Protein backbone atom coordinates (compact mmCIF):
# COMPACT_ATOMS: atom_id res chain seq x y z
CA UNK A 1 0.00 0.00 0.00
CA UNK A 2 1.33 3.40 -0.93
CA UNK A 3 1.71 6.38 1.41
CA UNK A 4 -0.36 9.55 1.09
CA UNK A 5 2.74 11.54 1.93
CA UNK A 6 6.42 10.84 2.48
CA UNK A 7 8.68 13.35 4.26
CA UNK A 8 12.07 12.40 2.93
CA UNK A 9 15.62 12.78 4.14
CA UNK A 10 15.12 14.94 7.24
CA UNK A 11 16.50 14.59 10.74
CA UNK A 12 13.62 13.20 12.80
CA UNK A 13 13.76 14.04 16.49
CA UNK A 14 11.53 12.82 19.30
CA UNK A 15 11.91 13.22 23.05
CA UNK A 16 14.15 10.15 23.05
CA UNK A 17 15.88 9.85 19.65
CA UNK A 18 17.40 11.86 16.82
CA UNK A 19 17.68 9.87 13.56
CA UNK A 20 17.98 10.57 9.85
CA UNK A 21 15.01 8.79 8.21
CA UNK A 22 11.91 9.16 6.07
CA UNK A 23 8.39 9.44 7.50
CA UNK A 24 5.55 7.70 5.67
CA UNK A 25 2.04 9.01 6.36
CA UNK A 26 -1.24 7.29 5.58
CA UNK A 27 -4.77 8.20 6.69
CA UNK A 28 -3.54 11.11 8.79
CA UNK A 29 -1.20 8.95 10.85
CA UNK A 30 2.45 7.99 10.80
CA UNK A 31 2.57 4.63 9.00
CA UNK A 32 6.33 4.03 8.72
CA UNK A 33 9.72 5.38 9.70
CA UNK A 34 12.71 4.16 7.78
CA UNK A 35 15.37 4.66 5.15
CA UNK A 36 14.38 4.87 1.47
CA UNK A 37 10.61 4.43 1.93
CA UNK A 38 8.67 3.81 -1.32
CA UNK A 39 7.32 6.89 -3.08
CA UNK A 40 4.18 8.49 -1.68
CA UNK A 41 1.31 10.22 -3.51
CA UNK A 42 2.99 13.41 -2.32
CA UNK A 43 6.60 13.95 -1.35
CA UNK A 44 8.29 16.55 0.79
CA UNK A 45 12.05 16.97 0.59
CA UNK A 46 13.27 17.60 4.15
CA UNK A 47 16.99 17.43 3.44
CA UNK A 48 18.81 19.70 5.88
CA UNK A 49 15.65 20.15 7.95
CA UNK A 50 14.56 18.96 11.36
CA UNK A 51 11.35 16.92 11.37
CA UNK A 52 9.80 17.36 14.82
CA UNK A 53 6.48 16.45 16.44
CA UNK A 54 4.09 19.39 16.22
CA UNK A 55 4.16 21.51 19.34
CA UNK A 56 1.62 20.91 22.09
CA UNK A 57 0.86 24.21 23.83
CA UNK A 58 -1.04 23.28 26.96
CA UNK A 59 -1.63 26.87 28.13
CA UNK A 60 -3.41 29.16 25.64
CA UNK A 61 -6.06 31.77 26.30
CA UNK A 62 -8.10 32.11 23.13
CA UNK A 63 -11.42 33.93 22.70
CA UNK A 64 -11.80 34.36 26.44
CA UNK A 65 -12.72 37.35 28.62
CA UNK A 66 -9.81 38.70 30.70
CA UNK A 67 -9.36 38.41 34.46
CA UNK A 68 -9.10 42.18 34.98
CA UNK A 69 -11.36 43.21 32.09
CA UNK A 70 -10.92 43.19 28.33
CA UNK A 71 -11.25 40.34 25.89
CA UNK A 72 -8.71 38.15 24.08
CA UNK A 73 -8.08 39.56 20.62
CA UNK A 74 -7.62 36.14 19.04
CA UNK A 75 -10.56 34.09 17.91
CA UNK A 76 -10.15 30.36 17.48
CA UNK A 77 -9.48 31.02 13.80
CA UNK A 78 -6.70 33.58 14.29
CA UNK A 79 -5.27 32.07 17.48
CA UNK A 80 -4.93 28.55 16.14
CA UNK A 81 -3.74 29.73 12.71
CA UNK A 82 -1.05 31.65 14.54
CA UNK A 83 -0.22 28.49 16.53
CA UNK A 84 0.08 26.44 13.34
CA UNK A 85 2.36 29.02 11.71
CA UNK A 86 4.66 28.68 14.71
CA UNK A 87 4.82 24.87 14.49
CA UNK A 88 2.15 24.04 17.09
CA UNK A 89 -0.50 21.45 16.23
CA UNK A 90 -2.38 21.08 19.53
CA UNK A 91 -3.57 23.68 22.01
CA UNK A 92 -5.24 23.32 25.38
CA UNK A 93 -7.38 26.37 26.13
CA UNK A 94 -9.56 27.51 29.01
CA UNK A 95 -13.29 27.12 29.31
CA UNK A 96 -14.01 30.14 31.54
CA UNK A 97 -16.54 30.10 34.41
CA UNK A 98 -18.30 33.28 35.49
CA UNK A 99 -18.65 33.54 39.28
CA UNK A 100 -22.07 32.14 40.20
CA UNK A 101 -22.37 30.54 36.77
CA UNK A 102 -22.44 26.95 35.58
CA UNK A 103 -19.24 25.23 34.41
CA UNK A 104 -21.34 22.93 32.25
CA UNK A 105 -22.94 25.80 30.34
CA UNK A 106 -19.59 27.56 30.08
CA UNK A 107 -18.04 24.44 28.53
CA UNK A 108 -20.96 23.96 26.12
CA UNK A 109 -20.57 27.54 24.98
CA UNK A 110 -16.79 27.24 24.67
CA UNK A 111 -17.20 24.08 22.56
CA UNK A 112 -19.30 26.11 20.11
CA UNK A 113 -16.66 28.85 19.96
CA UNK A 114 -13.75 26.41 19.61
CA UNK A 115 -15.34 24.48 16.76
CA UNK A 116 -13.69 26.99 14.36
CA UNK A 117 -10.21 25.81 15.38
CA UNK A 118 -7.76 24.92 12.62
CA UNK A 119 -5.78 22.54 14.85
CA UNK A 120 -6.77 19.93 17.43
CA UNK A 121 -7.63 21.26 20.87
CA UNK A 122 -8.70 20.36 24.36
CA UNK A 123 -9.94 22.33 27.39
CA UNK A 124 -9.01 23.03 30.96
CA UNK A 125 -12.12 23.81 33.02
CA UNK A 126 -11.64 27.08 34.93
CA UNK A 127 -13.27 27.10 38.36
CA UNK A 128 -13.66 30.53 39.95
CA UNK A 129 -16.38 29.54 42.32
CA UNK A 130 -16.81 25.92 43.49
CA UNK A 131 -20.51 26.25 44.37
CA UNK A 132 -22.64 23.19 45.16
CA UNK A 133 -23.93 23.30 41.57
CA UNK A 134 -20.41 23.42 40.12
CA UNK A 135 -19.19 20.56 42.31
CA UNK A 136 -22.15 18.50 41.06
CA UNK A 137 -21.51 19.36 37.42
CA UNK A 138 -17.81 18.55 37.43
CA UNK A 139 -17.85 14.71 37.50
CA UNK A 140 -19.78 14.51 34.22
CA UNK A 141 -17.63 17.19 32.57
CA UNK A 142 -14.48 15.31 33.60
CA UNK A 143 -15.93 12.02 32.37
CA UNK A 144 -16.62 13.70 29.02
CA UNK A 145 -12.87 14.27 28.59
CA UNK A 146 -12.18 17.63 30.27
CA UNK A 147 -9.60 16.03 32.51
CA UNK A 148 -7.88 19.14 33.87
CA UNK A 149 -9.23 21.85 36.15
CA UNK A 150 -7.69 25.31 36.41
CA UNK A 151 -7.72 27.42 39.55
CA UNK A 152 -6.42 30.88 40.35
CA UNK A 153 -5.12 31.78 43.79
CA UNK A 154 -5.27 35.48 42.83
CA UNK A 155 -7.26 38.06 40.79
CA UNK A 156 -10.39 39.55 42.40
CA UNK A 157 -12.67 37.93 39.82
CA UNK A 158 -11.09 34.48 39.95
CA UNK A 159 -9.31 33.65 43.18
CA UNK A 160 -10.28 30.69 45.31
CA UNK A 161 -9.35 30.54 48.99
CA UNK A 162 -7.75 27.56 50.71
CA UNK A 163 -11.06 25.93 51.69
CA UNK A 164 -12.23 26.21 48.07
CA UNK A 165 -8.90 24.90 46.78
CA UNK A 166 -9.35 21.82 48.98
CA UNK A 167 -12.89 21.23 47.64
CA UNK A 168 -11.63 21.41 44.05
CA UNK A 169 -8.66 19.15 44.76
CA UNK A 170 -11.07 16.66 46.31
CA UNK A 171 -13.44 16.60 43.35
CA UNK A 172 -10.44 16.13 41.04
CA UNK A 173 -9.11 13.31 43.25
CA UNK A 174 -12.47 11.51 43.24
CA UNK A 175 -12.94 11.84 39.48
CA UNK A 176 -9.39 11.53 38.15
CA UNK A 177 -8.51 14.95 36.82
CA UNK A 178 -5.34 17.04 37.05
CA UNK A 179 -5.49 20.44 38.78
CA UNK A 180 -3.49 23.31 37.23
CA UNK A 181 -2.75 26.25 39.48
CA UNK A 182 -2.04 29.95 39.01
CA UNK A 183 -0.17 30.34 42.29
CA UNK A 184 0.26 33.82 43.77
CA UNK A 185 -0.73 35.10 47.24
CA UNK A 186 -3.81 37.26 46.64
CA UNK A 187 -3.89 39.06 50.00
CA UNK A 188 -0.20 39.96 49.81
CA UNK A 189 -0.63 41.37 46.29
CA UNK A 190 -3.73 43.34 47.35
CA UNK A 191 -1.92 44.79 50.36
CA UNK A 192 1.18 45.78 48.40
CA UNK A 193 -0.94 47.19 45.55
CA UNK A 194 -2.82 49.43 47.97
CA UNK A 195 0.46 50.70 49.47
CA UNK A 196 1.89 51.43 45.99
CA UNK A 197 -1.26 53.24 44.86
CA UNK A 198 -1.32 55.25 48.15
CA UNK A 199 2.22 56.34 47.33
CA UNK A 200 1.12 57.44 43.85
CA UNK A 201 3.11 54.69 42.15
CA UNK A 202 0.76 53.66 39.35
CA UNK A 203 3.01 53.25 36.27
CA UNK A 204 3.11 49.78 34.61
CA UNK A 205 6.60 49.22 36.08
CA UNK A 206 5.02 48.84 39.55
CA UNK A 207 3.19 45.70 38.46
CA UNK A 208 6.34 43.75 39.28
CA UNK A 209 6.72 45.57 42.63
CA UNK A 210 3.18 44.57 43.61
CA UNK A 211 3.90 40.86 43.16
CA UNK A 212 7.55 39.98 43.85
CA UNK A 213 8.84 36.38 43.77
CA UNK A 214 7.91 35.82 47.43
CA UNK A 215 4.16 35.92 46.63
CA UNK A 216 4.69 33.23 44.01
CA UNK A 217 6.93 31.09 46.24
CA UNK A 218 4.46 31.25 49.14
CA UNK A 219 1.46 30.25 47.04
CA UNK A 220 3.37 27.44 45.32
CA UNK A 221 4.41 26.11 48.72
CA UNK A 222 0.85 26.39 50.08
CA UNK A 223 -0.94 24.72 47.21
CA UNK A 224 1.59 21.88 47.22
CA UNK A 225 0.82 21.35 50.91
CA UNK A 226 -2.93 21.33 50.22
CA UNK A 227 -2.49 18.87 47.34
CA UNK A 228 -0.43 16.64 49.63
CA UNK A 229 -3.32 16.58 52.14
CA UNK A 230 -5.69 15.37 49.41
CA UNK A 231 -3.14 13.17 47.57
CA UNK A 232 -3.97 14.98 44.35
CA UNK A 233 -1.57 15.53 41.39
CA UNK A 234 -1.16 19.20 40.43
CA UNK A 235 0.68 21.26 37.86
CA UNK A 236 2.01 24.69 38.86
CA UNK A 237 1.51 27.05 35.95
CA UNK A 238 3.96 29.68 34.70
CA UNK A 239 6.82 29.41 37.19
CA UNK A 240 8.97 32.53 36.83
CA UNK A 241 11.79 32.25 39.33
CA UNK A 242 14.24 29.93 41.02
CA UNK A 243 12.66 30.18 44.46
CA UNK A 244 9.25 28.99 43.24
CA UNK A 245 10.84 26.22 41.16
CA UNK A 246 12.79 25.15 44.24
CA UNK A 247 9.49 24.50 46.09
CA UNK A 248 8.49 22.17 43.24
CA UNK A 249 11.86 20.41 43.28
CA UNK A 250 11.52 19.77 47.02
CA UNK A 251 8.00 18.39 46.56
CA UNK A 252 9.14 16.12 43.73
CA UNK A 253 12.03 14.92 45.90
CA UNK A 254 9.42 13.86 48.49
CA UNK A 255 7.74 11.81 45.79
CA UNK A 256 4.73 14.07 45.29
CA UNK A 257 3.05 14.33 41.91
CA UNK A 258 3.74 18.02 41.44
CA UNK A 259 4.60 19.19 37.93
CA UNK A 260 6.05 22.53 36.91
CA UNK A 261 5.46 24.68 33.83
CA UNK A 262 7.27 27.79 32.72
CA UNK A 263 6.65 29.94 29.63
CA UNK A 264 8.86 31.22 26.80
CA UNK A 265 8.49 34.86 27.86
CA UNK A 266 10.06 34.21 31.27
CA UNK A 267 13.34 33.29 29.54
CA UNK A 268 13.58 36.63 27.72
CA UNK A 269 11.41 39.38 29.26
CA UNK A 270 12.40 41.19 32.45
CA UNK A 271 10.83 43.61 34.91
CA UNK A 272 12.66 46.40 33.04
CA UNK A 273 10.41 45.81 30.02
CA UNK A 274 7.52 47.32 31.99
CA UNK A 275 9.68 50.34 32.77
CA UNK A 276 9.23 51.96 29.37
CA UNK A 277 8.07 55.54 28.81
CA UNK A 278 4.37 56.34 28.92
CA UNK A 279 2.01 53.39 28.80
CA UNK A 280 4.28 51.23 26.61
CA UNK A 281 5.22 49.03 29.59
CA UNK A 282 1.63 47.72 29.65
CA UNK A 283 2.52 45.56 26.65
CA UNK A 284 4.69 43.41 28.92
CA UNK A 285 2.36 43.09 31.90
CA UNK A 286 1.54 39.47 32.57
CA UNK A 287 1.20 37.43 35.71
CA UNK A 288 3.28 36.38 37.45
CA UNK A 289 5.31 39.42 36.52
CA UNK A 290 8.51 39.14 34.44
CA UNK A 291 11.50 39.02 36.81
CA UNK A 292 15.10 40.18 37.05
CA UNK A 293 17.31 38.83 34.23
CA UNK A 294 19.16 36.54 36.67
CA UNK A 295 16.03 34.37 36.84
CA UNK A 296 16.42 33.41 33.16
CA UNK A 297 19.41 31.23 33.96
CA UNK A 298 17.74 29.87 37.08
CA UNK A 299 14.73 28.75 35.01
CA UNK A 300 16.95 27.08 32.43
CA UNK A 301 18.70 25.16 35.21
CA UNK A 302 15.36 23.88 36.55
CA UNK A 303 14.29 22.98 33.01
CA UNK A 304 17.54 21.16 32.26
CA UNK A 305 17.26 19.18 35.50
CA UNK A 306 13.62 18.24 34.79
CA UNK A 307 11.92 20.09 37.68
CA UNK A 308 10.12 22.29 35.15
CA UNK A 309 9.26 19.87 32.38
CA UNK A 310 6.86 21.86 30.21
CA UNK A 311 7.30 25.21 28.46
CA UNK A 312 4.12 26.82 27.12
CA UNK A 313 3.17 30.25 25.78
CA UNK A 314 0.42 31.34 28.21
CA UNK A 315 -0.79 33.10 25.07
CA UNK A 316 -3.06 35.83 26.47
CA UNK A 317 -3.61 38.33 23.67
CA UNK A 318 -4.85 41.78 24.70
CA UNK A 319 -4.51 44.47 22.03
CA UNK A 320 -2.42 47.52 22.90
CA UNK A 321 -4.82 49.91 21.16
CA UNK A 322 -8.62 49.82 21.20
CA UNK A 323 -11.33 49.33 23.79
CA UNK A 324 -10.90 45.64 24.68
CA UNK A 325 -7.19 45.38 25.43
CA UNK A 326 -4.50 46.95 27.57
CA UNK A 327 -6.29 50.33 27.45
CA UNK A 328 -9.73 49.00 28.45
CA UNK A 329 -9.56 51.23 31.58
CA UNK A 330 -7.87 54.13 29.78
CA UNK A 331 -4.42 54.83 28.41
CA UNK A 332 -3.11 55.96 31.76
CA UNK A 333 -4.68 53.26 33.94
CA UNK A 334 -2.83 52.17 37.08
CA UNK A 335 -0.89 48.90 36.79
CA UNK A 336 -3.45 46.90 38.80
CA UNK A 337 -6.33 47.32 36.34
CA UNK A 338 -4.46 46.70 33.10
CA UNK A 339 -5.33 43.32 31.51
CA UNK A 340 -2.63 40.78 32.29
CA UNK A 341 -1.11 38.70 29.55
CA UNK A 342 1.12 38.67 26.50
CA UNK A 343 0.68 36.96 23.14
CA UNK A 344 3.13 34.21 22.19
CA UNK A 345 1.56 31.10 20.69
CA UNK A 346 3.44 31.57 17.38
CA UNK A 347 6.77 32.66 18.86
CA UNK A 348 6.96 30.08 21.69
CA UNK A 349 8.78 27.37 19.77
CA UNK A 350 11.26 29.60 17.91
CA UNK A 351 12.21 31.44 21.13
CA UNK A 352 12.70 28.23 23.12
CA UNK A 353 14.58 26.60 20.23
CA UNK A 354 16.84 29.60 19.73
CA UNK A 355 17.52 30.33 23.41
CA UNK A 356 17.60 26.66 24.38
CA UNK A 357 19.01 24.50 21.59
CA UNK A 358 20.98 27.07 19.59
CA UNK A 359 22.04 28.71 22.86
CA UNK A 360 23.49 25.40 24.05
CA UNK A 361 21.28 25.12 27.16
CA UNK A 362 19.33 22.00 26.13
CA UNK A 363 19.63 19.38 23.42
CA UNK A 364 17.16 18.79 20.60
CA UNK A 365 15.36 15.89 22.31
CA UNK A 366 14.88 17.97 25.46
CA UNK A 367 13.39 20.71 23.29
CA UNK A 368 10.89 18.21 21.86
CA UNK A 369 10.19 16.90 25.36
CA UNK A 370 9.41 20.24 27.01
CA UNK A 371 7.38 21.69 24.13
CA UNK A 372 5.53 18.63 22.80
CA UNK A 373 6.02 15.19 24.36
CA UNK A 374 5.79 16.19 28.03
CA UNK A 375 2.62 18.28 27.70
CA UNK A 376 1.08 15.48 25.64
CA UNK A 377 1.97 12.99 28.40
CA UNK A 378 0.87 15.16 31.32
CA UNK A 379 -2.48 15.91 29.70
CA UNK A 380 -3.29 12.39 28.51
CA UNK A 381 -2.70 12.93 24.77
CA UNK A 382 0.39 10.76 24.30
CA UNK A 383 1.32 9.00 21.99
CA UNK A 384 -1.45 10.26 19.69
CA UNK A 385 0.23 13.66 20.08
CA UNK A 386 3.77 14.62 21.11
CA UNK A 387 5.83 12.14 19.12
CA UNK A 388 6.61 10.80 15.65
CA UNK A 389 5.95 7.08 15.93
CA UNK A 390 4.00 4.51 13.94
CA UNK A 391 0.31 4.98 14.78
CA UNK A 392 0.70 8.53 16.12
CA UNK A 393 -1.22 11.37 14.47
CA UNK A 394 0.92 12.83 11.68
CA UNK A 395 1.30 16.18 13.48
CA UNK A 396 4.69 17.37 12.32
CA UNK A 397 6.65 20.61 12.14
CA UNK A 398 9.50 20.80 9.63
CA UNK A 399 12.16 23.23 10.80
CA UNK A 400 14.94 25.14 9.13
CA UNK A 401 17.30 25.06 12.10
CA UNK A 402 19.59 27.71 10.64
CA UNK A 403 17.02 30.28 9.51
CA UNK A 404 17.65 33.65 11.12
CA UNK A 405 14.48 35.59 11.82
CA UNK A 406 13.91 39.00 13.34
CA UNK A 407 10.52 38.75 15.03
CA UNK A 408 8.07 41.33 13.70
CA UNK A 409 4.41 41.47 14.62
CA UNK A 410 3.61 42.24 10.98
CA UNK A 411 4.89 38.77 10.04
CA UNK A 412 2.84 36.91 12.67
CA UNK A 413 -0.70 35.58 12.20
CA UNK A 414 -2.43 36.47 15.45
CA UNK A 415 -5.02 39.28 15.50
CA UNK A 416 -2.73 41.22 17.84
CA UNK A 417 -1.39 44.70 17.16
CA UNK A 418 1.93 44.04 18.90
CA UNK A 419 4.30 41.32 20.02
CA UNK A 420 6.40 41.77 23.16
CA UNK A 421 9.25 40.15 21.19
CA UNK A 422 9.39 42.79 18.42
CA UNK A 423 12.93 43.03 17.02
CA UNK A 424 14.22 39.90 18.79
CA UNK A 425 16.53 37.84 16.64
CA UNK A 426 16.11 34.08 16.71
CA UNK A 427 17.76 31.21 14.88
CA UNK A 428 15.49 28.39 13.69
CA UNK A 429 11.89 28.59 12.50
CA UNK A 430 9.25 26.02 11.45
CA UNK A 431 8.87 26.27 7.67
CA UNK A 432 6.04 23.76 7.35
CA UNK A 433 3.36 22.49 9.75
CA UNK A 434 1.34 19.35 9.17
CA UNK A 435 -1.70 18.29 11.18
CA UNK A 436 -3.03 14.72 10.76
CA UNK A 437 -1.20 14.57 7.42
CA UNK A 438 -2.60 17.86 6.14
CA UNK A 439 -0.28 20.80 5.39
CA UNK A 440 -1.43 23.93 7.26
CA UNK A 441 1.56 26.20 6.83
CA UNK A 442 4.07 26.02 4.04
CA UNK A 443 6.96 28.45 3.89
CA UNK A 444 4.93 31.62 4.26
CA UNK A 445 1.63 30.33 2.93
CA UNK A 446 -1.30 29.52 5.23
CA UNK A 447 -3.43 26.65 3.96
CA UNK A 448 -5.29 25.90 7.20
CA UNK A 449 -9.08 25.59 6.99
CA UNK A 450 -11.09 26.91 9.96
CA UNK A 451 -13.15 24.18 11.62
CA UNK A 452 -10.90 21.24 10.71
CA UNK A 453 -9.53 20.98 14.26
CA UNK A 454 -10.97 18.25 16.49
CA UNK A 455 -11.75 18.30 20.20
CA UNK A 456 -9.47 15.91 22.09
CA UNK A 457 -11.41 14.22 24.90
CA UNK A 458 -9.09 12.72 27.51
CA UNK A 459 -9.65 9.41 29.29
CA UNK A 460 -8.04 8.60 32.66
CA UNK A 461 -4.27 8.10 32.41
CA UNK A 462 -1.31 7.34 34.67
CA UNK A 463 -0.16 10.86 35.55
CA UNK A 464 -3.44 11.62 37.29
CA UNK A 465 -3.51 8.39 39.29
CA UNK A 466 -3.14 9.32 42.95
CA UNK A 467 -0.32 7.76 44.98
CA UNK A 468 -2.64 6.45 47.72
CA UNK A 469 -0.51 8.12 50.39
CA UNK A 470 -1.89 10.65 52.89
CA UNK A 471 -0.10 12.55 55.68
CA UNK A 472 -1.92 10.49 58.36
CA UNK A 473 -3.36 6.93 58.42
CA UNK A 474 -6.78 8.47 57.68
CA UNK A 475 -7.94 8.40 54.05
CA UNK A 476 -10.16 11.51 53.71
CA UNK A 477 -11.54 10.30 50.38
CA UNK A 478 -12.89 6.92 51.53
CA UNK A 479 -13.19 7.78 55.23
CA UNK A 480 -11.19 4.67 56.12
CA UNK A 481 -8.39 4.37 58.61
CA UNK A 482 -5.48 2.45 57.10
CA UNK A 483 -1.71 2.50 57.10
CA UNK A 484 -0.97 4.31 53.89
CA UNK A 485 1.75 6.58 55.34
O1 LIG B 1 -0.98 37.32 32.70
C1 LIG B 1 -1.46 36.28 32.34
N1 LIG B 1 -0.77 35.17 32.42
N2 LIG B 1 -2.72 36.27 31.87
C2 LIG B 1 -3.46 35.18 31.49
C3 LIG B 1 -4.32 34.71 32.57
C4 LIG B 1 -3.52 33.89 33.51
O2 LIG B 1 -3.03 34.44 34.46
O3 LIG B 1 -3.34 32.70 33.30
ZN1 LIG C 1 -2.23 32.26 35.15
ZN1 LIG D 1 -2.72 31.71 31.66
Image (cartoon, rainbow, N blue to C red):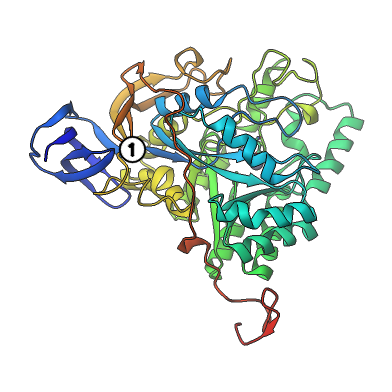
Question: 201 or 446, which is in the foreground?
Answer: 446
Question: 438 or 325, which is in the foreground?
Answer: 438
Q: Position of residue 145 (x, y in %)?
A: 53, 51
Question: Position of 154 compared to 354: left or right?
Answer: right
The relative height of residue 464 versus residue 442 in the rendered view (above or below) is below
Question: Position of 320 compared to 462: left or right?
Answer: right
The relative height of residue 419 versus residue 239 in the rendered view (above or below) is above
The quadrant of the image that shows the N terminus is: top left
Total marks placed? 1
Q: Position of residue 450 (x, y in %)?
A: 45, 24
- Ligand 3 quarter of the rendering: top right
Q: Quadrant of residue 388?
A: top left
Q: Position of residue 326 (x, y in %)?
A: 71, 21
Residue sitting at 72 percent across and 57 percent down? 136
Question: Position of 431 compared to 326: left or right?
Answer: left
The quadrant of the image that shows the C terminus is: bottom right
Question: 433 or 243, which is in the foreground?
Answer: 433
- Dot 1, crowdedness within 10 Å: few (<14), some or many (≥20)? many
Q: Position of residue 264 (x, y in %)?
A: 51, 36
Res. 355 visible in picture = yes
Residue furthest right in the image: 198
Q: Which residue is mark 1?
A: 395
Residue sitting at 77 percent across and 42 percent down? 101
Is label 1 in a helix, a strand or a loop? loop
Residue sitting at 64 percent across and 87 percent down? 482
The verdict on label 1 being within 8 Å of ligand 3 is no
Q: Quadrant of residue 449?
A: top left
Res. 290 visible in picture = no
Amino acid sequence: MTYDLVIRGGTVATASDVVRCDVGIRGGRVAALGADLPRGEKEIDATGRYVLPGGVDSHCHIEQPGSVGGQNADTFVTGTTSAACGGTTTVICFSPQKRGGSVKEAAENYHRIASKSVIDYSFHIVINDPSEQVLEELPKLIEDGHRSLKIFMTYDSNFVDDSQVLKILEVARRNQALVCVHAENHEAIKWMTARLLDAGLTHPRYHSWSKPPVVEREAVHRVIALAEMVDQPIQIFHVTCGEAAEEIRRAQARGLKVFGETCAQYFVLTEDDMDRPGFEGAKYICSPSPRHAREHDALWRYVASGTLDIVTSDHAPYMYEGPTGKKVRGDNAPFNIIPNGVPGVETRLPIVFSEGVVGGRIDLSTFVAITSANPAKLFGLYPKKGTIAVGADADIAIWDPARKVTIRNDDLHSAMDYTPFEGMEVTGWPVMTISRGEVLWNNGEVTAEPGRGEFLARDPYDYIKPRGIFPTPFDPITGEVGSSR
